[in-house]
Image: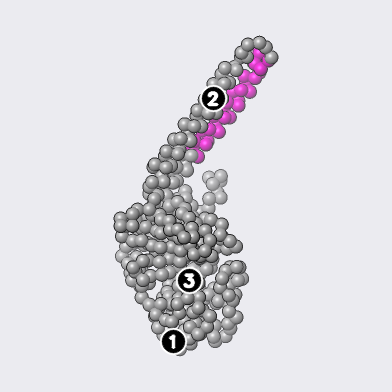
Amino acid sequence: MPALAGCGGRTQSSLAPESHAAKDIASLFWWMMGGAWIGLGLVVALLLWSWQRRKRRGFGRDSGGVKPGERVGWLVVVGAGIVVPIVLLATLFVISDVFVIKTTEAPAANATRLTVHVVGHEWWWEVRYPGKGVVTANELHIPARTPVRLEVTTADVIHSFWVPQLNRTIDAIPGKTNAIELYAEAPGRYRGQCDEFCGLQHAHMAFSVDAEPPAVFRRWLAAQARPAAAPASAAAQSGERAFLDGACSTCHTIRGTSAHGYVGPDLTHLASRTTLAALAIPNTRRTLADWITDSQAVKPGNQMPDFRLTGKRLQALLAYLEGLR
């Protein structure tokens, strides 16, 4: 409907739920929307009724005693203005707290087969799979139809993790870990977003949740746990040396090499990701080159400096990074 056009498409809409928790949230929204429309209709009806009563003889004139309609007016004020709002708000509070909030809470750590840690940074998401040796960024993979405990914190300012189609928002607060459940009823890609203003590139602090069949997810997890593949070509070998000897290795980690930086995302399997810069651009050779040479033009204010690489040196670095699958 036109009134809901601002909610966007199905890629990031809480009105297109794909989990039991998100469906409860959407149902609560529709109940509240219905209650609001009923309330509006009641107010309009009372206004029309008052307008018609006003035209009757004696209504509202100065005279002794109780004026015609005054008793009814008081009943309307007390009933519709005090009693009904209290009953409606109390009912919505009980429904939201008992039947909705409870269903969106994270299960106990020992009640799920998978726990994922997510750390917010300005402006990207670090994703860790404890005990699996897997670290990635901005693309979270989970098995479909499986409860996943998600534990969220931050390395700098307050962020907020939100996948509208799967569950409610959850804050990432410095020094504190909050938890929530992610559950996808069907395989698919679900877009998420930081929901707390956190600085210049808040709008470009997005991520994706890839829900996969369990067998596909296990293969992905096993592949991501492996160290980076050795460069296969002479150009890639030259690119590896450029990466390890330059400033790149002071900020990024590539498992299986001497690069153990922690400021930027882990790049061990960079080429397996579909996007760069927290979904800001697709992961192609051209966009990767643009990101390396002039990242501030792509995402102003990010912490990656520009590297004015050209010619063979840039092409060698690209060949190396494209081999990190």
At a point 42% along the width and 42% down the height, the residue shown is: 97
Q: Residues within 10 Å of mark 2 (few under 14, many from 20)?
A: few
At a point 63% along the width and 23% down the height, the residue shown is: 51
Chain-order first, disc 3 or disc 1: 1
Q: Secondary structure at mark 2?
A: helix
Rendered image: mark on residue 78: 2
Q: Position of residue 225 (x, y in %)?
A: 36, 72
Determine the image quadrant of residue 114.
bottom left
At a point 61% along the width and 23% down the height, the residue shown is: 50
Q: Position of residue 176 (x, y in %)?
A: 45, 58
User: Main SS type for the magenta part?
Assistant: helix
Q: Seen from this angle, which residue lies furthest top?
A: 64
What's the residue type where badge 3 is placed? Pro
Give the Cα separation between the discs numbered 3 and 1.
25 Å
Q: Secondary structure at mark 1?
A: loop
Compared with 100, 74 (above or below) is above
Say if mark 3 contacts mark 1, CB within 8 Å. no
Say if mark 3 contacts mark 2, CB within 8 Å. no
Task: Decide which of 170, 42 is in the foreground and name it.
Answer: 170
Which stretch is magenta?
Answer: 33-61
- Residue 205 on the magenta segment: no
Q: Position of residue 299 (x, y in %)?
A: 58, 68
Compared with 44, 322 (above or below) is below
Rendered image: mark on residue 233: 1
The residue singled out by tag 3 in the image is 265
Give the Cα separation between the discs numbered 1 and 2.
81 Å
What's the residue type where badge 2 is placed? Val
Report whether 106 appears left or right of 57.
left
What's the residue type where badge 1 is placed? Ser
